[in-house]
Amino acid sequence: MNQDNQDFWFPGKWIGGCSLLLAPLLLLAGVLLRLNFHFFFPEQLEAYEAHPLLMTWSYQLFLAGNIVLWPGILTLVRQVGLSKANWARWGGIMVVFGLFARTFHAGVDHLAFQLVRIHDLDLAGQTIAASYGAFHAASLLTLFILLGWMILAIGAYLSGTMNLFQCTSLAMMSLLMIGVLKGSSWTSVVATAGLCIALVPFGIKVLTAGNPPATKNVVQAVVAVLALVALLYFFGQAG
């Protein structure tokens, strides 16, 4: 077994730290953009019909934050796990599974908005209403979503990774409603703002720890990001 690089960890300081900074802000922005509209799905579809650009930005920013968040969660789990392995392991597993479930719901949200755009509001509303209780594998993860943030927050406190206020703020994410076409409430704002309070300072701490990256690594990262953006643009145009 190769023992040359004992300091390696996934996803690494820079990706994990940037995730901790960016993802909570994206989630909060997505929540705030739809705060003025009623919470349940008929009103969300009506809001999309009346304000398609605003609602698209709201849901896409939230989805982007949800996707970008996983490296930050793994980074937090790593730190908590140095002294509280079981709290880190189970909290991390549950939170990541919860991110999968929210991503699934975001796909349904996107399709529902396209039904409004391509057909009409009535058809979209009838389709969502008729299929709302249909079984899907992601529904099995609901309990994980509710418990994961609390377990991870307890682990973060017991391990000394975060102070009590930050850990309480992190646990508030358990209040964020899950499901198809869920709008925003002040509870949603509190939950996502709490995530910012917990993770952004920790992200700064992660990024400022240790030595700065080597020039070669920075160049490689920039090239990789530019290539990824180009590929995303290409496939987006092709789709």
Image (spheres, rainbow, N blue to C red):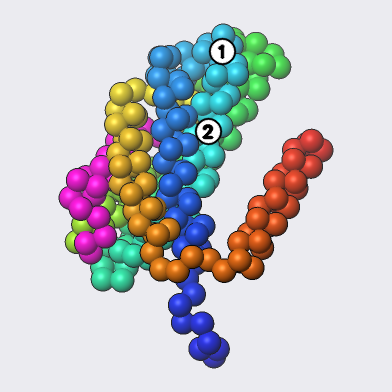
Q: Is residue 50 left or right of residue 90?
A: right
Majority SS type along the magenta span: helix
Residues shaded magenta: 159-178
- Determine which quarter of the picture holds residue 85: bottom left
Q: Quadrant of the C terminus?
A: top right
As drawn, the label of residue 61 is 2
The percent coordinates of residue 21 (x first, y second) are 43, 47
Residue type indicated by callout 2: Leu
Q: Is residue 198 left or right of residue 183?
A: left
Task: Estimate how packed mark 1 is, as few (under 14), some (14 to 19) or many (20 or more) residues with alpha carbons within 10 Å.
Answer: few
Q: Is residue 225 left or right of residue 231?
A: left
As drawn, the label of residue 72 is none
Callout 2 touching callout 1 (CB < 8 Å): no
Per the image, the residue denoted by label 1 is 51
What SS does tag 1 mark?
Answer: loop
* Vertical position of residue 41 compared to residue 150: above or below: above
What SS does tag 2 mark?
Answer: helix
Magenta-span inclusion, residue 163: yes
Q: Answer whether residue 11 is visible to the viewer in this image.
A: yes
The percent coordinates of residue 61 (x first, y second) are 53, 33
Marks 2 and 1 sit apart, C-alpha to C-alpha, by: 16 Å
